[in-house]
Amino acid sequence: MNEIANIAIIVLIIIGAFLSLVAAYGVIRLPDIYTRNHAASKSATLGVMSILLGTLLFFYVKDGFFNSRVLLGIVFIFMTSPVAGHLIARAAYNSGVKLWDKSVQDDLKNAPHMKKSASKDQ
Amino acid sequence: MAFQILLNVFLGFMWMFLTGSYEPVAFLKGYLFGLLIIFTFRRFFDSRFYLLRVVAVINLLFIFIKELILANIGVLKVLLKPKLDMRPGIFAYPTVLKEDWEIMVLSNLITLTPGTLVVDVSPDNKILYIHAIDIDDAKETIDSIKNTFEKAIMEVSR
């Protein structure tokens, strides 16, 4: 039983560390703010979630101590990270940051409410 | 729905007083028997049996976890490819959801799954503008969101 738990903890924490590493790598590698935002705010959620789950399981198996605050941490990450990601992307778009030149489509440019605000600025 | 839960709690307390034991287990037992009673009389309530809604919420949670893992693998593939040949872009997603909280949940779920991110919502709440890191086919992505998240949310709010 203890061995199985140990293997589960090791796998969870390695997956979490790997996902965080790849997210950091993606931030450096990707071309524009929108794609970097994907790497920074999203690959990290699953990574942090599995690290926290691994921590919870470790202390539960070792000390028999069930830390409910770790679970709350996961819930709060799920509530805050999409809002932050959305606001960063929206602020970037509204302040006129261009998409990567290999982007295939931009439906928002032709949206009626964006046109209106653009004509107001001029 | 709120009325059914209130009635169920009330039935639980009633069981506690009838049996004369004031322990949490007695309340739980009464709550379960109350659930049975409400299930039997479900056609006399104007809203549907509330446990169905609870099941729908749990179902939505599982769909979300599945999508989260699948989409993470997709983004990993894009990031670790030797050549950066993805095709990012913003596409419009017309939603049929009407309530504010439904759109909030939908856009949170879309943003949480890697690879897609809600950039803007049109003022009349009908169209979400989604940035995707790799659009093979915008139509396919729209269909997959429609069939997973939107359907599950509609199941909750029905």
Image (cartoon, rainbow, N blue to C red):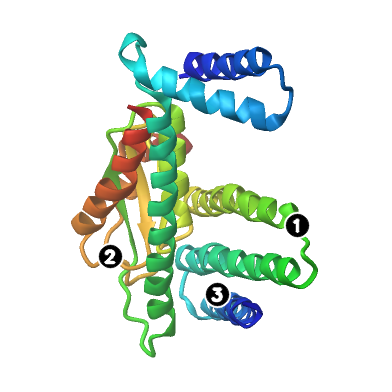
Amino acid carrying mark 2 in the image: Ile
Work out whether residue B37 or residue B2 is closer to the camera in this orientation and state it: B37
What mark, if any, has residue A23 been given in the picture? 3
Q: Residue A122: in sight, yes or no? A: no
Answer few, some or many: residues within 10 Å of disc 2's Cα (few below 14, many 20 plus, some between 14 and 19).
Answer: many
Image-quadrant location for residue B18 = top right
Amino acid carrying mark 1 in the image: Asn
The answer to whether dots 3 and 1 both sit on one chain is yes
What mark, if any, has residue B1 been given in the picture? none
The answer to whether dots 2 and 1 both sit on one chain is no
Callout 3: chain? A
Residue at (35, 42) in percent of width and height: B128
As measured in the structure, the alpha-carbon distance from the residue carrying label 2 to the one carrying label 1 is: 41 Å
Q: Which residue lies furthest to the front in this view?
A: B19
Labels 3 and 1: the sequence-earlier one? 3
Image-quadrant location for residue B1 = top left
What mark, if any, has residue A67 been given in the picture? 1
* Above or below, comparing residue A109 to residue B28 in the picture: below
What mark, if any, has residue B135 been given in the picture? 2
Q: Residue furthest bottom?
A: B82
Q: Is mark 3 on a helix, strand or loop?
A: helix
As measured in the structure, the alpha-carbon distance from the residue carrying label 2 to the one carrying label 3 is: 20 Å
Q: Residue B108 at what x, y percent from top left?
A: 47, 46
